[in-house]
Image (cartoon, rainbow, N blue to C red):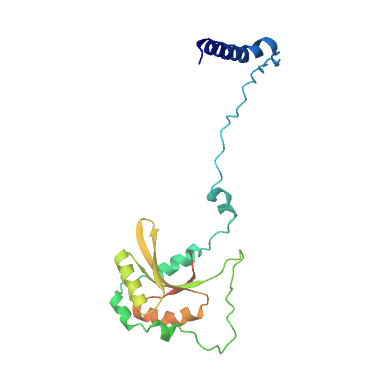
Amino acid sequence: MDPLLRQRLVGTLVLVSLGVVFWPLIFVTPDTREPMVLQPMSQRPVIDRTPIPEPESYESSVAPKLPDLPKNPSQVQEVADIQTQTDAEADSLAALPDSESVTAPQPRLLPPSDDAIVDDQGLPIFYVLQVATVGSAVRADELVKGLQSRGYKAFSSRYVRVDEELFRIQVGPNAERAPLMRLKPEIDAVLEVDSQILRYEQ
């Protein structure tokens, strides 16, 4: 290519490039934009720092509305504890008939008993036969196991009289007195006590 022609082409390209760059700066009116206005900072929010009260517990909200659990009168329970004190050992229970022959349901020859089903608070009434009162957890456990081996629903509960630790052994609970009444003479003969029918306490 002719050097002169090459120089002219290069010069033309340079002029076109400069025109592309500077044309908008010289001949195009720039867009006018509204100035940015900064809003004033809002006031610091007020935070309530009052302590949050603790939620109500079961004891404070529900327990006061529940009926009182049934309890035997103290005099009745004291008599039962005295009348059922025994020195008999668990081995003596071997002479006790099994539960099926004593407390099994019997054909009704009489109308149903007049035993109340619920108390004044609407709580169901169940009965137990207190068969023994002993001063040793070991003896109480042995008597309970001896009764259970004969098929009776027996259990023990601990209580303190003045400064003496004692254990009540009871059979039940049962919705009717009749099965416990049939068991009473058998227990009295074997353990040499005067067993007492009481209301079941949870």
Residue 16, image x, y percentages: 60, 14
Asked which quadrant contains residue 43, the reply is: top right
In the picture, measured across the screen, residue 107 lies left or right of residue 37, that is left
Look at the image and tell me whether residue 27 can be seen: yes
Q: Which residue is found at the position 56% from the left and 43% from the top?
A: 55
Residue 76, image x, y percentages: 48, 67
Look at the image and tell me whether residue 86 can be seen: no
Q: Is residue 115 above or below residue 45?
A: below
Q: Is residue 113 above or below residue 127?
A: below
Asked which quadrant contains residue 47, the reply is: top right
Q: Is residue 74 above or below residue 132?
A: above
Foreground residue among 27 and 187: 27
Asked which quadrant contains residue 119, the reply is: bottom right
Foreground residue among 44 and 2: 2
Q: How many marks?
A: 0
Q: Is residue 12 above or below residue 42?
A: above
Spot the residue most to the front. Answer: 2
In the picture, measured across the screen, residue 179 lies left or right of residue 189, that is right
Residue 109, image x, y percentages: 56, 90
Foreground residue among 8 and 26: 8
Residue 149, image x, y percentages: 34, 78
Q: Which residue is found at the position 36% from the left and 63% from the top?
A: 166
Foreground residue among 49 and 18: 18
